[in-house]
Amino acid sequence: MSETIAAASGRELSYAQAIQEAIGIAMEEDERVFIMGEDIGVYGGAFQVTGDLVHRFGADRVIDTPISELGGAGVAVGAALTGMRPIYEFQFSDFATLAMEQIVNQAAKLRFMLGGAVSVPLVMRFPSGSGTGAAAQHSQSLEAWLGHVPGLKVIQPATPYDAKGMLLAAIDDPDPVMIFEHKILYKMKGEVPEGRYTVPIGKALVRRAGRDVTIVATAIMVHKALSAAEDLAKDGIDAEVVDLRTIRPMDRETIIASVMKTGRLICVYEGVKTLGVGAEISAMIAESEAFDYLDAPIVRLGGAESPIPYNPELEKAVVPQVPDIIQAARALARRER
């Protein structure tokens, strides 16, 4: 089933339930698929995403690992090289820093270094982002780090529908796919069809059509951008919201076409602004035919130059919020080149 087929049943699942369902479908279809990570078995995962999978498939396919991200990631890479299709869950995306050797130097490079003789069909899942009061070492958005590495595919589903479809696409993929799942989205509900379907990796989606300004957003910022767009419409500003969905490979065509239509661009993402996803999008537009269509400078709304604070008000202050998007769009709509 492709993403163009609507969910006619009206069945709703949470983002977390959609992920669990995708894993269950993949494990039922293919005995090579298994999942591993810390506390994912009887406990059901730090965010209860794996749920009862251990009771359905057993502890030999839903594997609780020791507290060693480097070791667990190495086992996952090795299993992928032998023809298995592992899914490795990090408790928090921040802990990717402990496994960068296996992710960056092994998983990403082995197909290239061995002349295409092997593939690494590996999925790694990273609960990411702020909003839970988990403070500086458990709240980061590090997708731009891994998006910098050739050989990796990096995705950020923003809805339950995409969470299921993109995960199934990732499991099918012959190359390593890194999935960043915003923690605040786990409880968000949305329409999700039963059975197997996939959402293509590398394809952005226009969530809201508009004519005055393009807002390219990632993960939870998609929902903030859509909320801002509704308020902007009351001011007569018609915003187009593009859900990036894939960090690498990035969908140039959809973004460029949108900017050529609206003439204005705002990039909204939770990761730190400097050298972030918005910087790559901005450079893409500057180097493309869309540059001549710009009627105002590009605006980047990213995270502040700060670790994520524990205090809830400070935590909100260091990442873009709906009023920030509204203010930026209003100012951009008034500017002429």
Image (tube, helix red, strand yellow):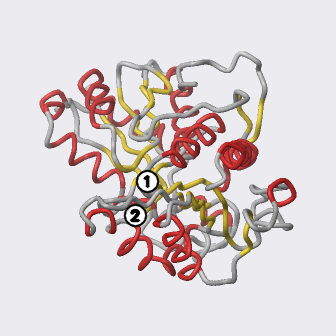
The residue lying at 52 percent from left, 57 percent from top is 319
Question: Residue at position x 23%, y 41% from top?
Answer: 297
Say which label, 1 or 2, has the lower sequence index.
2
In-image side of 126 versus 82 (left or right): right
Q: Is residue 174 above or below residue 318?
A: above
Residue 134: x %, y % from top left: 68, 71
Where residue 229 sits: x, y (%)? Answer: 51, 28
Q: Can you give x and y, in whole percent of width and height, for residue 115 in the image? A: 24, 63
Are the residues flagged by discs 1 and 2 in contact, CB closer than 8 Å?
yes
Q: Secondary structure at mark 1?
A: strand
181 shown above or below 194? below
Q: Nearer the viewer, residue 153 or 119?
A: 119
Picture layout, residue 171 above or below residue 83: above
Label 2 element class: helix
Q: Is residue 166 left or right of residue 26?
A: left
Locate the N terminus by quadrant: top right
Q: Which of these two is toward me, 177 or 61?
A: 61
The residue at the point 66 percent across, 59 percent down is 34
Q: Is residue 322 visible?
A: no
Q: What residue does disc 1 label?
A: 154
- The image shows residue 269, relative to residue 195, as above or below, that is below
Number of numbered discs visible in the structure rendering: 2
Please tell me in which quadrant of the rendered image residue 286 appears.
top left
Label 1: few (<14), some or many (≥20) within 10 Å? many
Query: Label 1 vs label 2: CA separation?
Result: 7 Å
Name the residue tied to disc 2.
146
Identity, as a three-letter code, of the amino acid under mark 1: Val
Q: Residues within 10 Å of mark 2 (few under 14, many from 20)?
A: many
